[in-house]
Image (spheres, rainbow, N blue to C red):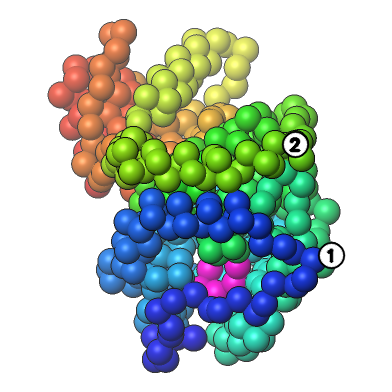
Amino acid sequence: MTSRNTTPLFALQQEGDPPAIARSRSDLAYRLAFGAIGWPWLLFSLWGGWKSEKRRLLQRVGLDDDALPHLGSWKADTGFLHRIVDAVEELRPANVVELGAGATTLVCAKALERNGGGRLHSFDQHAGFVDATRRWLRDEGVDARLEAAPLQAQVSGWPGAWYDLPELPETIDLLVIDGPPWSVHPYVRGAAECLFDRLSPGAMVLLDDGARPGERVVARRWRKRWPNIRFERVAGSTKGTLVGRRQREGQVIAFPGKPSSQRANDWRRAAMFALAFAGGWLVHATIGQPEPASAASFIEEADASYDATQARLRMASQIETPLLECRELAVATGIDLPAVPEGWTLKDVQVFPSDHGPAVALVMETDEGESVSLFATRAETPAEKLPLLETREGRSLAYWENGPFAYALASEAEANRVLALASRVAG
């Protein structure tokens, strides 16, 4: 189970479908069609990520250099594993449910151990693999609830066999979906929506292989059926990740599954997919480059926080707090703040809501008397550690990223000066 051991190239063989789960001709057609379409993802998935990213991952969760197996193939890659750690650091979840055990189980369990505890409930269809994973975690000094869940169930509206899940926690704060394999059916992971009504407000869903054609169809259906969960496909892993965030207010509106009268059309739909592939349309639609990250919403939030902090400073009735407790803020919000440069004066510290969870805003005065606002949250932008500049309505915003965190320094100072100040904060 570590890099000291050999691991198979291909996924473990199914332990046999129970008689109650019939494999229809339409299911076979879908597997053939999507197998032809999805081969680029299957080929690319043989690469498990950069070795440097694997080393960084091991350091993040406190594991030895040889604690993980060789990644890639049917196993999660470093990009998806880093996203699990990001989610645990942000959410500090009490209950994590994982579908499909393996490297994700150890990484998630270690991340929980280092970020305030929480319970991992992991399920896999292979009983022998569950036993081996349980021993592996015990050898690494971590604990989780691992149970076998054979593929003996079906979820209304979704094809293929689904996990026969035992008792689940009443609320789920983080749902990690890395199974069943697509060979059961390209849409099989869509049945995970049977757990969405257990998601707590602010909970997160992580679906591995989110760029594959089958998972893209699943994502479109989920967006329609669950309007209070915001789904976004993000790059950074070999087959993409679909990230869902449940809103903190509103009710889930789930539409019923397709009527049985529509099932007769399954074969024709599968044939249409194959014809579309042959004509090149579906190839163009699904094999294109990953969706580019956008900084627009992050910049809008940073700009709005600047207005809010400046309004607060102008109001005598609003008491500012210059007390900056970085550790307390990190525990409460999951956000790490950069150090305040020497000679700068802290005027106010505030926590704001954002599309990506809690955000922190600092109002500071530089050593030359300029008023600046630093906005920090978790987000993905095109920036890296070197700040990028954007100007709007008489002010400039320089933004950059460091790990999972995005920062923006806003000021009404001259644009190049703001960029220089941001470079100083970014270090």
Q: Which residues are magenta?
A: 100-104
Question: Can residue 192 be seen at all in this image of the molecule?
Answer: yes
Q: What amino acid type should be assigned to the residue bearing mark 2?
A: Ser
Q: Depth check: give the residue in front, 318 or 126.
A: 126
Relative image position of residue 72 (x, y in whole percent) = 38, 70
Task: Say which residue appears at 41% left-offset and 29% top-offset.
Answer: 298
Helix, strand or loop at label 1? It is loop
Q: What amino acid type should be assigned to the residue bearing mark 1?
A: Glu
Going from the N terminus, do you reach mark 2 or mark 1 first? 1
Does 80 lie within the magenta span?
no
In this rendering, the count of numbered labels is 2
Task: Say which residue appears at 40% left-offset and 65% top-offset.
Answer: 77
Q: Depth check: give the residue in front, 318 or 73.
A: 73
Residue behind mark 1:
167
Instruction: Tell me: 394 left or right of 184.
Output: left
Decide: marks 2, 1 in contact (CB < 8 A)?
A: no
Relative image position of residue 240 (x, y in whole percent) = 41, 51
Relative image position of residue 301 (x, y in whole percent) = 45, 24
Disc 2 versus disc 1: nearer the observer: 2
Helix, strand or loop at label 2? It is helix
Residue behind mark 2:
261
How far is mark 2 from mark 1, CA to CA? 33 Å
Question: Can residue 366 be seen at all in this image of the molecule?
Answer: no
Q: Depth check: give the residue in front, 415 or 76.
A: 76
